[in-house]
Image: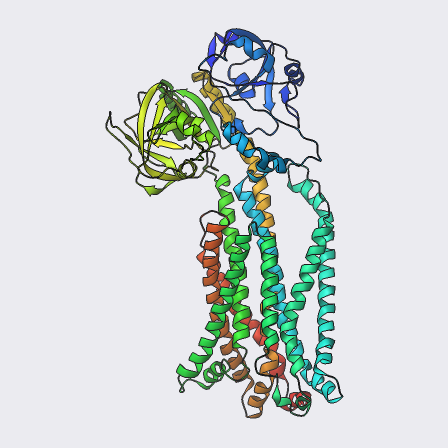
Amino acid sequence: MVVFPSADHQTRLVTLRALEAAYPFYGKLLTNPPEAAARLAAGEPIMVLEETLMSQFALQPGDPIKLGSATFTIAGALRNIPGDATGLTTMSPRALLPLPQLASTGLLGVGSLVRYRNFFQFPDTFDVERLIPQLKNRFRDLNLSFDSVVARKRGLGKAVESVDAFLSLVGFIALFLGAIGVASAMQVYIRQKLPTVAVLRCLGASGKQGFAVYLIQGLGIGIAGAALGTALGVALQQALPWLAQRWLPFEVAFTVSWTQVAQGFLAGVVICVLFTLLPLLAVRRVTPLAALRSGLGEPTGQDPLRWLVWLAIVAAVTGFAIQQTPRWQVGLGFVAALLLAFAILSALAKLTAWAARRFFPSRAPYVWRQGVANLYRPQNRTVLLLLSLGLGTFLIVTMALTRATLLAQIGTTSDNNRPNLLFFDIQNDQIATLESTLQAEKAPLLVKAPIVTMKLSRYQNRSIDDVAKDKSLNLPSWTLRREYRSTFRNHLTPTEKIVAGSFTPTVAPGTDPVPVSLEQNLAKDMKLALGDFLTFDVQGVPLNAQITSLREVEWRRMEPNFFVLFPEGVLEAAPNFFVAATRASQPADSARIQQAVVSALPNVSAIDLGLVLETLDEIFSRVQLVVQIMALFTVFTGTIVLAGAILGGRYQRLRETVLLRTLGASRRQLVQIQLVEYAILGVLGAAVGCALAVAANAALAHWVFQTTPVLQPLTLLTAAAAVTALTLLTGWLANRSINDHPPLEILRQET
């Protein structure tokens, strides 16, 4: 507690920090006036106070302040400490003091709660991450916690990490969809070149030579495409600094990683060649007789090399997926999902062809019978088209649903009803005054929570000292030694959800043990389960508690959340204070509300989160834009692949259409036959693809992003309708030229 002699000796609870001169190693303390930071480093008998605290008590630099048994001079207001975000979460404002002056306050006596932080700065060439494993056990033996810059980077935010994983998956899916397009286009190309290969065989060329000719073509196209894509990527990278200056509130240094460029180029070439090999294998088995009998079509029968190519494709895709995902387990899971989708779609295609032949009524209209018959006729395209349509739909809709899931996760910081003005250190007899003051200012009291400080004294009927010394338990020391700020109420808040057991809202006075609800991650760290016992030291009074429920807490919401939740009827008599939150729609309203509260309750502190939340909203809105752009890029890639799959069927249906024209079928009937076939394929592919996408989104949300999946029925219906419409449109456009030309002209072209 500090005392302000110039403000009628009012008192205030503060979080005191005593700093050495070298702190901080990076960045600067921002104070007003600026020279206050230099005076701190010089060790003068001064203090620097939080800006909100200075405003609340109308303090000025030069005013006295009493701390413990010593009196200091206020040098200025604290605006920012580099790398410190505790101003958002601490229950009291910060006060800074030179470390050499701390002893004069008398605050380091027996019973004081002090935590020491030591910071180390290593040379740039020193491998800090290699040092940490070497010291980890020694730190644990001494009950010391530690972290590093890398560890802090990992903890910046799960939502942002999820976006990074999402963008990596987008890159993988875009490449995979492109590979499917390559295979589909190459198959159409090879089918058209089979007569040429047969002529070459008649002239003495071997099957290997014919295979090599088209393999060189495919390799050349792959290298050219990968080189063009790499050049475009590098050019876009050069434009990123200019874009980042407009989008991000901080500077980012961009450099071109030529290693990554080489990896991207190599991945594009390898995937292109592997997917080109599948249709190319048929060239090796073309016989000279095919030049004389065009009806032979593609070679049939098993080709053992196809299995080797498939294994190489699976290996390459698996390697690339592992590289692009945050954990190798996720990469394997993603590949397994693709293989499962392949298996389901292949089985569905064969089942559709079998059912169309077996169960379709023979008395159905002629157009319907011909369209359905196309699904099972020799050399039908049912399997390939359903694979392309279903897999493309699956991947695209998965990305759309995953994007919605991630943006919903990020959107928790963008709720227009969230509190943005927090009030701390509200005494028990002041909460009613605060409510009436806020009501007069037309600011709703959105959140209020009583807070009781306590520490653990016993763990499962063992003293905390004994448990801390027992290394076999492997419990984090912070869970045993920390000061818990707990609350009591008879209900759950929107940021909480019971995941195990049942919450007890109220108990009778004197209940022993008291049923409590524990946050699930804390219970996991402490290896506690339902029914286990803890004893809390509530400011000198022991309180036995039994865990009767576990809660999932949304910590990203800037609202009062707690590790331990007590029922009503136990802690009301314990010393406590309140934290409350409201919402101010405009900065002017926030200032007016704070002035009214400070006038009525001078000891209450207010923290305006408006600027912080505005910055977060700006960053996340730009992240959302990046996600949308990447998702649209994937949709565009998938659309090209779907169109290519439909165009691939044009060659197969050419002779059948000409034959029907010769037998008297009208142009309208031919169009209807084609539309029936493509409508069935489009609906089936879209439906199965959407169903697989729902399952994949749920798996990604649970295993990768650790969040709740979002199901968007409108997205599914729109995707299904769009895929079906695209299938019909592309099929009609691909075959329109056949229907518009005389049969004899096309027969002459074919022969």
Task: Please give left or right for residue 91 compared with residue 189 in the image.
Answer: left
Image quadrant where one finds the C terminus: bottom right
How far across and how far down the image is residue 126, in percent?
68, 34
Q: How is the image coloured?
A: rainbow
- The residue lying toward the viewer, choosing from 486 and 285, is 285
Regarding residue 513, the answer to whether it shows in the image is yes
How far across and how far down the image is residue 548, in percent?
31, 37
How far across and how far down the image is residue 630, in percent?
60, 53
Number of dots carrying numbers: 0
Q: Is residue 453 above or below residue 389?
A: above
Residue plotted at (63% across, 75% down) = 279
**Which quarter of the figure has residue 384?**
bottom right
How far across and how far down the image is residue 465, in percent?
41, 25
Regarding residue 571, the answer to whether it shows in the image is no
Task: Please give left or right for residue 608 compared with residue 749 in the image.
Answer: left
Residue plotted at (53% across, 33% down) = 137
Q: Residue furthest right?
A: 203
Q: Is residue 358 above or below residue 80?
A: below
Residue plotted at (49% across, 31% down) = 420
Q: Is residue 712 above or below residue 82?
A: below
Q: Is residue 126 above or below residue 391?
A: above
